[in-house]
Amino acid sequence: MLGPSVVYTAAAVLLLSSVSAQDEFCGGLIVPREEWGARAPNAVSYTDDYLPYMFIHHTVTSECSNFDDCAEQMRIIQNYHMDSNGWSDIGYSFLVGGDGKIYEGRGWNVVGAHTSGYNSVGYI
C-alpha cells in the first residue's frame, strides 16, 4: 500500500509548492479543518510566510476512498498525535487522503511537528 500513498503525497507536494499561502485553501482544493472535524489545537506557534522547505512523511492508517472515511482517518491521526504523542495538534501541515483530496492539518504558517529541528522552517 506504500505505492499509492507516495504518489498522492508527491502530487500534494507539487500542488502545494505551486500556490501561495494567501490563496485561501487553494481555491477549494484543500479541505479545511472544520470540514473534516478537527479538534481545536491546545497551542499554536506561527512561522514566517514562504517557508523554504517541504517535507514528505507517511503515516500508517486504514485505506480510505471517500470523504467520510478519509475525514475519520484524519481524526484518528490527530487523536493519536495529541493523545498518545502529547503534541498540541496533528503533526502535519497537510495530509492527502486516499480519495485524492488534500486535508488541512496545521495549515499554512503554523509550526508543525514530526521533523525534529526543522519544524519551524518547512511544511510537513
Image (spheres, rainbow, N blue to C red):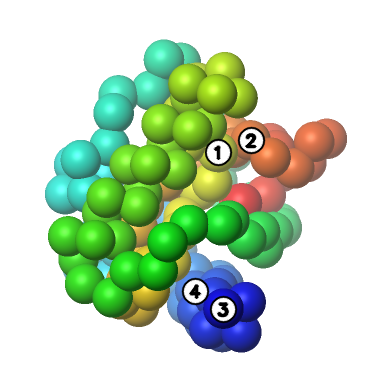
Q: Which residue is mark 2?
A: 113
Q: Secondary structure at mark 1?
A: loop
Q: How much space separates mark 1 and mark 4, taking CA atoms?
A: 17 Å
Q: Is label 3 or label 2 in front? A: 3
Mark 1 and mark 4 lie on one chain; the one further toward the N terminus is 4
Q: CA distance from mark 3 to mark 1?
A: 22 Å
Compare residues 9 and 29 and report the one nearer the observer.
9
Q: Which residue is mark 1?
A: 91
Compared across the picture, whether 83 is left or right of 29 comes to right
Q: Amino acid at mark 1?
A: Gly
In the picture of the structure, the residue carrying the numbered disc 3 is 1
Q: Do residues under tags 1 and 4 come within 8 Å of each other at their CB atoms?
A: no
**Residue 70 showing in the rendered view:** yes
> Image check: 14 left or right of 41?
right
Tags 2 and 1 in contact by the CB under 8 Å rule? yes
Dot 3 and dot 4 residues touching (CB under 8 Å) = no
